[in-house]
Image (spheres, helix red, strand yellow):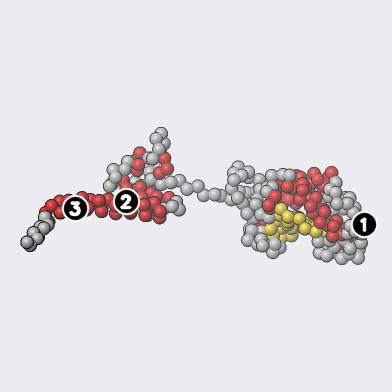
């Protein structure tokens, strides 16, 4: 006996599958929405505003007119017309950090780096004026070179007693009162100790040790202030970087010094 051929009711199948069109549209919209969220994972205020504007119509979004938060304008800020974004789009207010001038501590969170010769000269003037208030006109020198600003302070009877690695009371006061000037920018500060060529060998303690210990003594005073310790470093050069001839007492006195080097931004290693 031959089997009966089963008849397929096409009309019934079409009725049963009709929901697939709506389902497919919904899945496509969801996928597009999440792609947009992923693309905006790095927040861009302009893109955000375009998204809000685009959703205003299809989803009856009132955020454009009312803001996203109650009792305020919310994240979209206040209205404006921008030819690149579109009329009526709310803008996120962008705060642009402005560099601080020396002496301006109104915004301690804003970083300021000295880079140009003009920036360095401004700080140079402040430091020299400060040191001169201690009567050190003949004990200091300064220069701006390829590294940045270097301020040299003679050690004899100013910062240290002869042959001593310990800061004098006057030396501690001078360095401590320099700290507020150094906190007004964020450049690296190198502290470099130097000696003359007169041999110093007391139980193995040499000019190398003396120059390094003097630089560290200055660093320790500075790091107790508000200066970030990561900005500071100390180095001893002994007698090997003279600025004058060691054949005269005046030359040797000039070589016994501590230098503060404010490294210009962009020249750090």
Q: Nearer the viewer, mark 2 or mark 1?
A: 2
Q: Quadrant of the C terminus?
A: bottom right
Where is residue 2? Give x, y as percent.
7, 62
| Label 3 Cα crowd, 10 Å radius (few <14 / some 14-19 / many 20+) | few
Q: Nearer the viewer, mark 2 or mark 3?
A: 3
Disc 1: which residue: 203
- Distance from disc 1 to disc 3, alpha carbons, whole Å, reads 98 Å
Q: Picture coordinates of residue 263 (x, y %)?
A: 69, 58
**Residue at figure coordinates x 90%, y 53% from the top left:** 162
Residue for point 40% across, 42% down: 78
Q: Answer with left or right where residue 201 lies relative to residue 141.
A: right
How far apart, in angstroms, are the residues tagged by discs 2 and 3?
A: 21 Å
Q: Which type of secondary structure does the marked residue at label 2 adopt?
A: helix
Does the image show residue 33? yes
For image coordinates 40% across by 38% down, the residue present is 69
Q: N-terminal of the two: label 2 or label 1?
A: 2
Determine contact: label 2, label 1, CB under 8 Å.
Answer: no
Residue assigned mark 2: 30
The answer to whether any part of residue 140 appears in the image is no
Circle 1 Cα neighbour tier, 10 Å, few/some/many (<14 / 14–19 / ≥20): few
Residue lying furthest left:
1
Give the secondary structure at mark 3.
loop
């Amino acid at each position: 006996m031959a089997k009966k051929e089963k008849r397929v009711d096409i009309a019934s199948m079409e009725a049963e599958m009709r929901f697939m069109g709506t389902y497919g549209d919904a899945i496509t919209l969801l996928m597009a929405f999440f792609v947009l969220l992923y693309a905006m994972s790095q927040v861009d205020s302009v893109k955000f505003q375009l998204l809000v504007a685009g959703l205003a119509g299809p989803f009856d979004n009132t955020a454009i007119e009312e803001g996203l938060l109650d009792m305020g304008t919310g994240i979209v800020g206040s209205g404006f017309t921008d030819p690149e974004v579109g009329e009526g789009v709310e803008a996120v207010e962008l705060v642009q950090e402005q560099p601080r001038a020396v002496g301006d501590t109104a915004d301690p969170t804003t970083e300021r780096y000295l880079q140009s010769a003009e920036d360095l000269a401004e700080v140079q003037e402040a430091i020299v004026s400060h040191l001169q208030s201690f009567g050190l006109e003949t004990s200091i020198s300064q220069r701006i070179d390829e590294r940045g600003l270097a301020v040299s302070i003679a050690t004899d009877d100013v910062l240290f007693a002869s042959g001593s690695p310990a800061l004098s009371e006057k030396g501690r006061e001078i360095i401590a009162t320099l700290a507020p000037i150094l906190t007004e920018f964020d450049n690296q500060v190198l502290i470099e100790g130097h000696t003359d060529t007169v041999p110093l060998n007391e139980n193995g303690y040499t000019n190398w040790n003396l120059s390094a210990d003097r630089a560290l003594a200055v660093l320790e005073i500075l790091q107790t202030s508000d200066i970030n310790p990561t900005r500071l470093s100390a180095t001893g050069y002994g007698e090997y970087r003279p600025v004058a001839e060691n054949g005269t007492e005046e030359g040797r006195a000039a070589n016994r010094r501590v230098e503060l080097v404010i490294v210009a931004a962009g020249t750090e290693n």
